[in-house]
């Protein structure tokens, strides 16, 4: 019997968080190995496990997988969260691509200066409310179903909820003009595996703090400043 997936990353969100979300949504237990020192990272590099010299790294089904999108594709397909046919997969890929772009504006937020954070916060909210959320609002309104694709729970739903909660951390009432997304958030949050992941004590990571930023900078030797988009 295969063991639990093992995730190698920092003790924080970053690019691994969507992988944690998807595994949790599928009801899959996983283990985590946190990178805390440069020596740990160099050991992974020397082992050849990091194909492109980057984390996230996930050990699953006898494979050592890198590249976030490849990992997510595999998990979604393995646990039937990737649609019933090629057309549904195409829609899921499109919707995930959109939320992925939105989350890209948030990913480096913790590494910005205080001044740049305020600028980026405005950018995040503007992009969410003018470019991304209207798309999902319209999709849900037009087809009148509970989920984004094929009226079945999929990776697209998981990713959208993750994105919504991330943006709400920047502006709590960001969904005030999006009634369909408000209802969607309630529905998806009540799915048992998601509800469990949202509860205190789960492996969901909190908003990145200074300790997380310092650890990432030290391990990856990020001595340069990050600028707002």
Image (cartoon, helix red, strand yellow):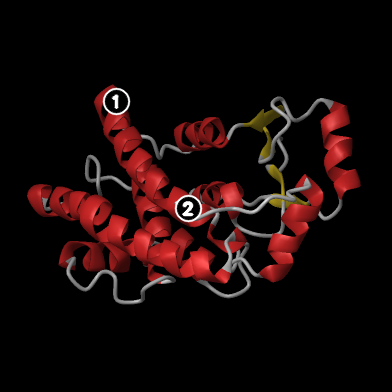
Vertical comparison of 115 with 228: above or below? below
Secondary structure, mark 1, is: loop
Q: Which of 110 and 86 is in front in this view?
A: 110
Give residue 62's quadrant in the image: top right
Q: List the residue tagged with mark 2.
A: 25
Vertical comparison of 52 with 127: above or below? above
Q: In this view, does 75 lie to the left or right of 175?
A: right
Report if the CB atoms under discs 1 and 2 are less than 8 Å apart.
Answer: no
At 51% from the left edge and 34% from the top edge, which residue is drawn?
69
Q: Position of residue 176 (x, y in %)?
A: 21, 73
Name of the residue lying farthest toward the left: 142
Q: Which of 151 and 118 is in front in this view?
A: 118
Local crowd at mark 2 within 10 Å, few (<14), some, or many (≥20)? Answer: many
Vertical comparison of 7 with 111: above or below? above
Secondary structure, mark 2, is: helix
Q: Position of residue 165 (x, y in %)?
A: 41, 65
Q: Is residue 204 visible?
A: no
Disc 1 and disc 2: Cα gap in Å? 20 Å
At 43% from the left edge and 57% from the top edge, which residue is drawn?
162
Local crowd at mark 1 within 10 Å, few (<14), some, or many (≥20)? Answer: few
Vertical comparison of 223 with 5: above or below? below
Q: Can residue 176 be seen in this view?
A: yes
Residue 85 numbered tag: 1
Give residue 86's quadrant in the image: top left
Q: Earlier in the sequence, mark 1 or mark 2?
A: 2
What is the quadrant of the N terminus in the image? top right
Q: Which of 133 and 183 is in front in this view?
A: 133
Q: Is residue 106 left or right of residue 32?
A: left
């Amino acid at each position: 019997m295969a063991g639990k997936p093992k995730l190698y990353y920092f003790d924080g969100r970053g690019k691994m968080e969507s992988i944690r979300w998807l595994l949790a949504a599928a009801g899959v237990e996983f283990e985590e190995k946190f990178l805390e020192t440069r020596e740990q990272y160099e050991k992974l590099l020397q082992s050849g496990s990091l194909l492109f010299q980057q984390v996230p790294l996930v050990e699953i089904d006898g494979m050592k997988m890198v590249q976030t999108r490849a990992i997510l594709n595999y998990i979604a397909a393995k646990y039937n969260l990737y649609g019933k046919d090629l057309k549904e997969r195409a829609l899921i890929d499109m919707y995930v691509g959109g939320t992925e772009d939105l989350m890209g504006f948030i990913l480096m937020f913790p590494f910005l200066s205080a001044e740049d954070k305020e600028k980026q916060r405005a950018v995040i909210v503007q992009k969410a409310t003018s470019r991304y959320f209207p798309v999902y609002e319209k999709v849900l309104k037009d087809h009148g179903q509970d989920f984004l694709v094929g009226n079945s729970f999929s990776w697209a739903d998981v990713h959208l909820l993750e994105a919504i909660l991330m943006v709400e951390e920047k502006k709590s009432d960001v969904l005030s003009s999006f009634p369909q997304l408000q209802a969607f958030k309630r529905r998806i949050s009540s799915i048992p595996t998601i509800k469990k992941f949202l509860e205190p004590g789960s492996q969901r990571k909190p908003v990145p703090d200074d300790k997380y930023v310092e650890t990432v900078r030290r391990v990856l030797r990020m001595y340069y400043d990050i600028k707002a988009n």
